[in-house]
Image: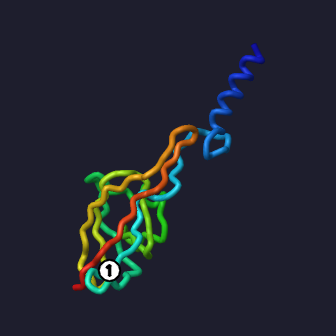
Amino acid sequence: MKNTLFCIIIILFNGCTEGWYNDIGPCEHVYIEPVLHIESAGDSVTGQEIDNIKISNVFLDSEPAHFIILKSQMQNIEVVDSVLHCTIPCAFGIEPGDYEFTVSSEGYEDVALKVFAIYSEGGGGCPSYSNGGTRIKILMVQE
């Protein structure tokens, strides 16, 4: 009986070591990168790159986005008074879905965006993962 129980335990642990992620441990979901990436922002007429933007009024699937969720995966972003200050390129969020937000930058008109953000790859198993977030480029009009 002891040998059978030992064998079952070994099989259970072995199931968590196969695939791309070879650590023994709890089964969990790993987000390799954020789901929404802003690769560039630029002037719609001149093509001049815009280095810094502010992102506000963020909604996910028509509900106000919780900054705790957004902050769990952020790149090149600082949160100041519920506004995401983004140094391009930047990225945020882990939940796929319809993101709505306002983009602003000094000297430019605000831009309201709606983006369906998803991961392009993912895998099940133990653990599972998401990777390859949606990439966008933003064009802005001078005031």
70 horizontally vs 60: left or right: right
Residue at the image point whose x is 43% and y is 57% from the top: 133
What secondary structure is marked by label 1?
loop
Q: Residues within 10 Å of mark 1 (few under 14, many from 20)?
A: some
**Does 26 sit above or below residue 83?**
above
The image shows residue 32 at horizontal and vertical percentages of: 53, 55
**Does 50 sit above or below residue 136?**
below
The image quadrant of residue 135 is bottom left
Residue receiving disc 1: 105
The image shows residue 23 at horizontal and vertical percentages of: 67, 44
The image shows residue 126 at horizontal and vertical percentages of: 58, 38
The image shows residue 14 at horizontal and vertical percentages of: 68, 33
In front here: 81 or 104?
A: 104
The image quadrant of residue 39 is bottom left
**Does 68 sit above or below residue 56?**
above
Residue at the image point whose x is 62% and y is 46% from the top: 21
Residue at the image point whose x is 46% and y is 56% from the top: 132
31 horizontally vs 55: left or right: right
Residue at the image point whose x is 57% and y is 42% from the top: 127
Q: Quadrant of the C terminus?
A: bottom left
10 horizontally vs 15: left or right: right
**Does 90 sit above or below residue 49?**
above
Q: Quadrant of the N terminus?
A: top right
**Disc 1 residue type (three-letter):** Ser
Residue reaching furthest to the top: 1
